[in-house]
Amino acid sequence: MNKRTFLKTSSALVTGSIISQLMACKEREARTNWAGNLTYSTDNIYTPKTVEEVQEMIKKYDRLRVLGSRHSFNDIADSIENQISSAGLNKIIALDTANSTVTVEGGIKYGELCKYLDENGFALHNLASLPHISIAGACATATHGSGVKNGNLATAVSAIEFVDANGNVVNLSEEKDGDVFRGAVVGLGALGFVTKLTLKLIPTFSMKQVVYKNLPMAELEHNFEAIMSSGYSVSLFTDWSNKNINQVWIKSRFEDTDSGSVAPDFYGAKASDRNIHPLEDLSAENCTEQMGVKGPWYERMPHFRMGFTPSSGKELQAEYFVPLEHGYKAMMAIEQLHEKITPHLFITEIRTMSADELWMSPGYKQACAIIHFTWKQEKDAVMQLLPQIEQQLASFNARPHWGKLFTMPPQVLQSRIEKLDDFKKLIAQYDPKGKFRNAFIGKNLFGS
């Protein structure tokens, strides 16, 4: 222990101050986000391990932001003063088998929860492509999996606990708190530090995954919703070359299919004869099993294996939500830019999600088609392309993913959020002095 740490720890023992202990344990976390495209603006990062420590931290500082698993590609979690990490609150608190719910601390990652649920006979309704993201962060930004009948990850939440700007512990539930609960779940980190979440569960189930190659885009014109409904979860991957869908990934409940059989054709696409990566030149070693092989839900719904822990992602991501009924037309609007997009792109993925009632979700009262871009780390070129893509999607009232790159002017974004005024009232209630605001919140929710 160095001299500074010794002195701070000694002071904590003398005064009994939780804050001093946290200061002594201030971690040297990576100063960038997962992708490395953003360097955080402060070295003041703290990792509390109890709700009481969270309360002390929040009472002490005038400005701070909560930091999750660092998988956001923009500055939504950034702060020029203090960040408070959720990584230390990562436990499973209780499994309620009678009511089919599980209560967890906000910092736990999906990959750390799913096997436990499966072993106890339960499953989550949906998962994202990557299982290495924190549950609180994913829900706060309306992150999603896929499926025309599946809501985003936040729709599994039935109760939420957070510490507000005054250090008070707030508990809200779907059953008792109605609209206020629906406003708080996708909270963007603007209401407080999420300490606990209760998630609704379904009985565990098995899945299989089949991949088809080279689907003509023209097949989507009259069959978009049928194709996207052909499995429990469906993803289309394209690099926008030759009006072609490179790959179609279809994830199905095993009991809903003809066992492990794989149809050779799918709307003109051909079944892959091997496991493949969305970027076909890359090894499929870290991808979830394909070829119709039966497996547990949590080993098929993500695209990447739970046991594969990425240390960084040398990529940029942007993503836009449009009404499901306009999915094909929105794709064709983007296709007009293919000559500009393709040189800077790794891959685009098109998915779907069902409508929900969560105020700040892009799926509020509308089912969505989701167009996701995984870009090469060519930031200048990408940031010049995004306004052009947003313009192509303007007639569909597209909304961006809260945790990914976008350039949409604040007044345009705000005009597309039906419940924004109500959400601002929640912010005023739980954070009247703007303790949890940062440049991202200030610009996108309050900017003109």
Image: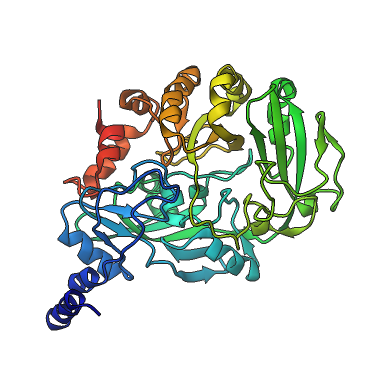
Q: Is residue 306 left or right of residue 419?
A: right
In the rendered view, how is the structure colored? rainbow
Q: Nearer the viewer, residue 303 or 93?
A: 303
Which percent across, then down, holds residue 315? 50, 42
Which percent across, then down, holds residue 366? 52, 32
Which percent across, then down, holds residue 126? 59, 50
Q: Is residue 248 above or below residue 302?
A: above
Res 297 seen here: yes
Identify which residue is drawn at 53% across, 69% down.
96
Q: Quadrant of the N terminus?
A: bottom left
Q: Nearer the viewer, residue 433 or 131?
A: 131
Q: Quadrant of the C terminus?
A: top left
In the picture, residue 60 is in which quadrant?
Answer: bottom left
In the picture, residue 10 is in which quadrant?
Answer: bottom left
Q: Is residue 386 above or below residue 178?
A: above
Res 163 seen here: no
Q: Is residue 20 left or right of residue 389?
A: left
Identify which residue is drawn at 69% across, 41% down.
280
Identify which residue is drawn at 12% across, 79% down.
15
